[in-house]
Amino acid sequence: MNISRILLLILSASVLCAADGGGHSDGHDHGTTAGKSSDALQQLIDGNNRYVEAQFRHPHQLAERRMEVAKGQHPFAIILTCADSRVPPEIVFDQGLGDLFVLRVAGNVIDDAVIGSIEYAAEHLGTPLLVVMGHERCGAVDAAVKGGEVPGHIGALVKAISPAVVKARGKAGDLLDNSVRANVEMVTAKLKSSQPILAHLVEDSKLEVIGAYYDLDDGHVHFMK
């Protein structure tokens, strides 16, 4: 077998490996904490672009990856987003097992349990990026905008989101959309200043906290830096 033939076989094997979604086909080492937050953000941007364009890689979804992360996790980003069934982060960002540390609660609101979970990922796992992602036409925010009585424990969500609605009132544009964005901004600010862990990590440049807005219609995630 001549050298050209050998090189062709090697190249073909490499292409197949990248296409099957196993290993580290996106060119990043997910076996580490993913380095700087800018690198993590770029991975999210690239993944969302693939999702929007329907050019999925479906990385890290094979048995090999399952066995790898069973030994330990090193997610490159923390995603706090709504529980809405239309906003699954692993799909929206085209990621797989062990890539994202995800927290989902209606209206992407926070309490001690949510903050504690974020602290675990940021402090213990060393994840460098936290994204608070709201979305278009959020039902929880809409309930807060409409006001009035709500059943059961939904009232706790409305109470948490209501300050964002107050902040958004009087601004030009759609009140619901403005309230979604205001809610993201307020949650982001609270997490940045959360003592004693998150504020310390932010101050030491070990954690970046940013907001994002997901468009249900076209699939784009717009980052609010």
Image (spheres, grey):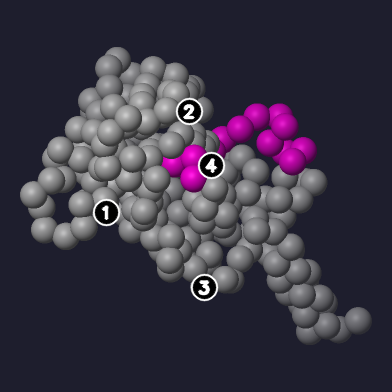
Write down the residue under mark 1.
Answer: 177
Residue 131, numbered label: none
> Are dots 4 and 1 in contact, CB under 8 Å?
no
Residue toward you, 40 or 138: 138
Compared with residue 124, is residue 180 higher up or lower down, i.e. above or below? below
Residue 66 appears at what percent x and percent y?
A: 74, 41
Nearer the viewer's eye, disc 4 or disc 3?
3
Residue 109 appears at what percent x and percent y?
A: 36, 32
* Amino acid on which disc 3 is placed: Glu
Query: What is the residue that sits farthest to the top in this orientation?
Result: 196
Q: Secondary structure at mark 4?
A: strand
Compared with residue 72, is residue 6 higher up or lower down, i.e. above or below? below
Q: Is residue 124 visible?
A: yes
Q: Of marks 1 and 2, which one's residue comes earlier in the chain?
A: 2
Label 2, residues with CA under 10 Å away: few <14, some 14-19, many ≥20: many
Q: Of marks 4 and 3, which one's residue comes earlier in the chain?
A: 3
Residue toward you, 36 or 160: 160
Compared with residue 135, is residue 55 higher up or lower down, i.e. above or below? below
Q: Of marks 3 and 1, which one's residue comes earlier in the chain?
A: 3
Q: CA distance from mark 1 to mark 2?
A: 30 Å
Nearer the viewer's eye, disc 4 or disc 1?
1
Residue 53, numbered label: 3
Residue 121, numbered label: 2
